[in-house]
Amino acid sequence: MKTHIVLSIPRTNSTNTSLLIFRYYTAKYPNQTVWLNSILNWASHNRLFKDIFDAEGKIIGRKACEVYEDGAYLDLPKVVNTNKVYMTKLYKNFIFDPNSLKNETMHRIKLLETYKEYMYFFKCHLPDDYNIILNYLNNSHRIVCIKRFDIFNQMLELKLAMHTGVYQLKNQAYFSKPDNNSIIITKEEIRLFLKKVHLYYQTIQTINPKIILYHQDLVNETAIYNLLGFNDWQEYLNLEDLKKERLYEPPYHKFDIRSLFDNIEQIEDWFIEISNTINLQF
């Protein structure tokens, strides 16, 4: 069976969408599914994170770390069902080759193909070695792509997440907004971001068949399942339980994100200049 997988770029609600897809298949086909985080995005997959706690010691999110700190851990796949034998076999053969992106990616794909009897799911941002991964995904999954039209805000949100290290939270109330004029984006950062966006939209034009979702429509669990065509989801899942597991992005609607950036006017000028240079189309 070809299951669904999300191929995306950052700040498109891809994490929640990916997890909802996984939870649907897990409920419908119990004990046959495995969640593998971002196994094909090896650069982000091996990042370090620290849990964020509230005043009562409850985990409310996590923060990215650049170096080892007390309590830091690797973003490795976690066993989220009963397939412990699968996970044990997978990680006995697991290597990490930071010197060869292609070799590392091919190694991970071969490991996944070894265990085709399971339905495995992961979040996949468009990587530099996208041709290798696309060939694999086209054969193994139904690809879900997410489009977002407010690219400028997407860039600001990504930079804010990189600045704070906070990408998702269990409760938006715990987000600590940085001071105004405390963040700077360089022209090179804008160029790299727009290059990735441009590559993503060029790439998804080559994928057929595919399911296209739009970021502004992914407002809640019901909307996402309906857009995916999972019309029987309520037979297997409880909406209130799903809400308890929901991850939130920072509450961008509660503050003017532009005010956080010290060089916002320069950022706007560079964004327009580079967008026109690469002929950004989506």
Image (tube, helix red, strand yellow):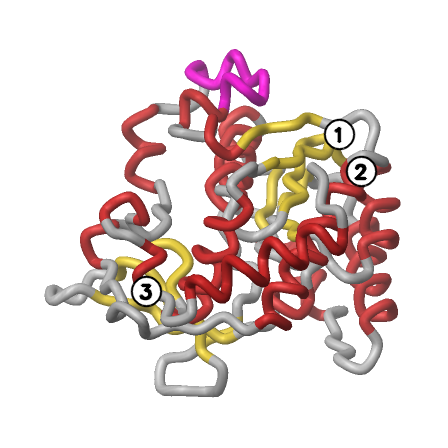
Question: Which amino acid is tagged 2?
Answer: Ser
User: Is 20 situated above or below 46?
Assistant: above
Q: Whole-percent x and y of residue 60?
A: 26, 58
Quadrant the C terminus occupies = top right
Q: Circle 2 is placed at which residue position? A: 140
- Closer to the camera in the image, 181 or 135: 181
Mark carried by residue 253: none
Per the model, the C-alpha gap separating discs 1 and 3 is 43 Å
Residue to which mark 1 is pinned? 2
Q: Which residue is mark 3?
A: 260
**Residue 142 found in image quarter:** top right
Could you tell me residue 176's position as x and y percent?
23, 64
Residue 48 x/y as whole percent = 50, 75
Q: Where 168 falls versus 178 (above or below)?
A: above
Magenta span includes 165: no
Rounded to the nearest angstrom, the CA distance separating label 1 from label 2 is: 6 Å
Please report whichever mark, 1 or 3, sits nearer to the chain's N-terminal start: 1
Label 3 or label 2, whichever lies nearer to me, is: 3
Mark 1 residue type:
Lys
Rendering quarter of residue 263 = bottom left
The secondary structure that most of the magenta stretch takes on is helix
Q: 170 or 190, which is in the foreground?
A: 190
- Quadrant the N terminus occupies: top right
- Pointers 1 and 2 in contact (C-beta within 8 Å): yes
